[in-house]
């Protein structure tokens, strides 16, 4: 089976034209006509993940974060990006990224998985975007396009109980949050990855908590005692994206092996 059949599947769920302008989703290295020997799935395309793929007989790495965001003028192996690209090309390993295009869909998307893990229902896009004729797959399947998700808990929780649930379900050792508001949590907004810019949209939905990552110090003040911000960390907020991709690939293809990486690519450690 050729790589293009895999990329066609992934792009039927998350078309490349749904990615943000700064992004670099799609096939980064490799030939669409190459036969697949196996697929390694990871959040990041690091050198160690590529080595793991080779050791498992995989010639494709599907990752959430592109290894290349900006143009490379030289590839000399002087940093982790150049080292990974050189190693992938030398060993004929294709690298495919499915990033903000996967963030921007509801079904099979990054945020839907988080919502399922937290037990949210009545899901809707936090910032919906209108469907267009260029995305017929969405109109057929009823999928929605946009940023973030809003949903309801099965039953309201005390703020501390919700934060403990969040910490447990998202497997994080640290949650940075704004001051408690001493009111129950029933409606939650979610945006995996860097979602601080979407805080006004979360507040417009009158949610009790906004779960995301990468908030800067001064951005926490923007809650204005109206909403509880829960910053769970970038890697932690997107870690289940790997399971989304694994399920999607294994449910549709059985003629090659797929693996979830055993390597944690989180560059941040907590003491």
Image (spheres, rainbow, N blue to C red):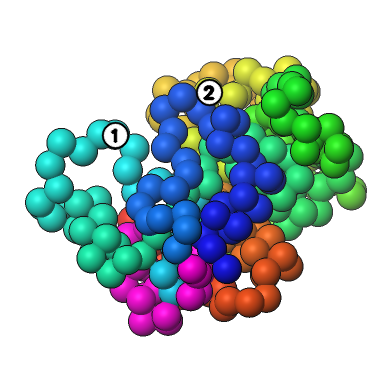
Q: Which mark is residue 70?
A: 1
Q: Which residues are magenta?
A: 35-57
Task: Report if residue 182 lies within the magenta region.
Answer: no
Q: Position of residue 67 (x, y in %)?
A: 34, 48
Q: Position of residue 167 (x, y in %)?
A: 61, 57
The reply to whether dot 2 and dot 1 touch (C-beta < 8 Å) is no
Task: Establish if 44 lies above or below 20.
Answer: below
- Judge from the rendering whether residue 165 lies leftward or rightward of residue 52; answer left or right: right
Q: Position of residue 42 (x, y in %)?
A: 47, 62
Secondary structure at badge 2 equals helix
CA neighbours of label 2 inside 10 A, class few (<14), some (14 to 19), many (20+): few
The answer for how far apart the CA atoms under marks 2 and 1 are is 22 Å
Task: Establish if 230 lies above or below 126.
Answer: below
Task: Report if residue 49 lies within the magenta region.
Answer: yes
- Judge from the rendering whether residue 105 lies leftward or rightward of residue 43; answer left or right: right
Q: Position of residue 22 (x, y in %)?
A: 42, 28
Disc 2: which residue: 197
- Dividing the picture into quadrants, the one containing residue 18 is top right
Q: Earlier in the sequence, mark 2 or mark 1?
A: 1
**Residue 210 visible within the image:** no
At 25% from the left and 34% from the top, the residue drawn is 71
Instruction: Quadrant for the N terminus, please.
Output: bottom right
Secondary structure at badge 1 equals loop
Front residue of 97/91: it is: 91
Q: Which mark is residue 46?
A: none
At 27% from the left and 60% from the top, the residue drawn is 89
CA neighbours of label 1 inside 10 A, class few (<14), some (14 to 19), many (20+): few
At 45% from the left and 63% from the top, the residue drawn is 34
Task: Establish if 133 lies above or below 165.
Answer: above
């Amino acid at each position: 089976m050729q790589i293009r059949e895999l990329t066609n599947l992934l792009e039927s769920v998350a078309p490349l034209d749904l990615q943000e302008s700064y992004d670099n989703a799609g096939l980064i290295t490799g030939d669409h006509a190459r036969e697949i020997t196996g697929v390694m799935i990871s959040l990041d395309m690091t050198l160690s993940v590529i080595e793991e793929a080779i050791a498992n007989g995989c010639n494709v790495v599907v990752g959430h974060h592109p290894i290349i965001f900006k143009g490379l003028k030289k590839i000399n192996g002087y940093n982790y990006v150049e080292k990974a690209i050189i190693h992938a090309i030398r060993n004929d390993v294709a690298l495919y990224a499915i990033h903000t295009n996967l963030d921007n869909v509801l079904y099979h998307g990054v945020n839907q998985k988080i919502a399922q893990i937290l037990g949210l229902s009545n899901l809707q896009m936090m910032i919906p975007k209108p469907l267009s004729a260029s995305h017929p797959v969405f109109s057929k399947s009823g999928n929605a396009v946009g940023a973030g998700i809003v949903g309801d808990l099965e039953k309201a929780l005390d703020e501390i109980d919700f934060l403990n649930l969040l910490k447990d379900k998202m497997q994080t050792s640290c949650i940075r949050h704004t001051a408690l508001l001493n009111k129950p949590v029933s409606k939650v907004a979610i945006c995996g990855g860097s979602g601080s810019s979407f805080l006004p949209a979360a507040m417009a939905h009158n949610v009790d908590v906004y779960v995301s990552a990468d908030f800067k110090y001064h951005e926490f003040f923007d809650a204005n005692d109206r909403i509880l911000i829960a910053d769970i960390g970038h890697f932690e907020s997107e870690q289940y994206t790997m399971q989304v991709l694994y399920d999607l690939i294994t449910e549709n293809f059985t003629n090659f092996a797929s693996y979830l990486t055993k390597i944690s690519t989180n560059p941040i450690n907590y003491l």
